[in-house]
């Protein structure tokens, strides 16, 4: 039978393990609490399971409610002591990163970019899919060789992103389209450009369903592109009204 000293040591060890577990869980609980500030997590316009079977409900829940929420919270926390900067629209902050104080520039780049990218991402997806029409379809034919070639080139660009990042279709004020990929949460907004739409190729966007099969995810994702919404963004870009 173990001695009293051994039993006491075991209890102490178990207590230490439990304390370590609480320490690990504590950030997760805090993580769910919104940080006050100018930026808010936008609600989804559809249910978490609306994009199935192409994107599963659990991925949507984790991606929106945890990952995007963390970007918003961290962005607000970084701006807490920078009131004048916090008053500016996000696209202007990101377009002028060199004017952001050194102490928070990386936090703004990563979390501001993450907030902008994901806000766009939820908006340009939906359960009905469809196809590009009108001026948008004409621009895709003119600048990118048609929808099929766009999809092929877009998927190839997304597949070439090393590690985490995004692939975008950008649009200028004249309606010209171009493909662009970025690392991490960098966004075309940082170069004064506008993203017409983009796809998130961070593993958290697809790993639960597709594991390491990013090409399969990229191919399936086209089934949930909300082309009417993309068309609205295209019209807004040409009118100089597209923000993020």
Image (spheres, grey):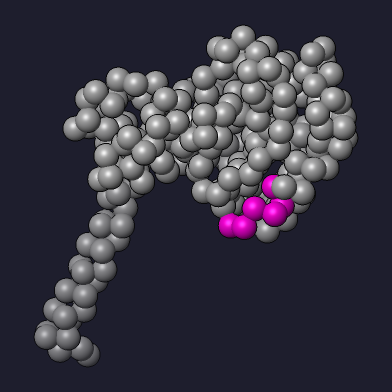
Quadrant of the rendered image containing residue 12: bottom left
Residue 135, horizontal then vertical, whole percent: 79, 13
Residue beneath the point at 22% across and 25% down:
83
Foreground residue, 184 or 121?
184
Question: Residue drawn 17% across and 86% down?
Answer: 6
Residue stretch in magenta: 158-163
Front residue of 145/227: it is 145
Q: Is residue 32 visible?
A: no
Position of residue 113 in the picture relative to residue 24 (left or right): right
Is 159 included in the stretch rendered in magenta? yes
Instruction: Please name whichever residue, 77 or 167, is drawn nearer the observer in this view of the structure.
Output: 167
* Residue, far top: 239
Residue 109 position within the rendered picture, expressed as x and y whole percent measured from the top left? 41, 41
Place residue 239 in its image quadrant: top right
> In the image, is residue 138 part of the stretch drawn in magenta?
no
Residue drawn at x 83%, y 42% as measured from the top left: 152
- Name the spot of residue 24 as percent of width and height, x first: 31, 57
On-image quarter of the N terminus: bottom left
> In terms of image quadrants, where is residue 35?
top left
Does residue 121 appear left or right of residue 94 in this picture?
right
Q: Please state the horizontal and vertical placement of residue 198, each as a whole percent of the image.
A: 64, 34
């Amino acid at each position: 039978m173990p001695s009293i000293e051994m039993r006491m040591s075991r209890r102490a060890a178990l207590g230490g393990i439990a304390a370590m577990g609480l320490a690990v869980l504590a950030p997760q609980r805090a993580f769910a609490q919104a940080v006050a500030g100018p930026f808010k997590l936008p609600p989804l316009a559809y249910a978490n399971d609306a994009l199935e079977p192409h994107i599963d409900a659990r991925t949507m829940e984790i991606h929106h409610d945890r990952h995007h929420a963390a970007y918003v919270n961290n962005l607000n926390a970084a701006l807490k002591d920078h009131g004048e900067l916090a008053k500016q629209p996000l696209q202007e902050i990101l377009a002028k990163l060199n004017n952001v104080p050194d102490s928070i520039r990386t936090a703004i780049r990563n979390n501001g970019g993450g907030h902008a990218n994901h806000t766009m991402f939820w908006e340009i997806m939906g359960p009905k899919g469809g196809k590009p029409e009108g001026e948008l379809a004409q621009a895709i034919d003119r600048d990118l060789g048609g929808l099929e070639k766009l999809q092929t080139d877009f998927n190839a660009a997304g597949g070439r992103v090393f590690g985490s990042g995004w692939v975008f279709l950008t649009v200028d004020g004249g309606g010209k389209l171009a493909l662009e990929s970025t690392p991490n949460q960098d966004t075309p907004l940082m170069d004064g450009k506008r993203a017409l739409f983009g796809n998130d190729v961070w593993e958290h966007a697809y790993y639960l369903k597709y594991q390491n099969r990013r090409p399969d995810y990229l191919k399936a994702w086209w089934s949930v592109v909300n082309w009417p919404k993309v068309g609205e963004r295209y019209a807004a870009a040409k009118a100089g009204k597209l923000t993020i």
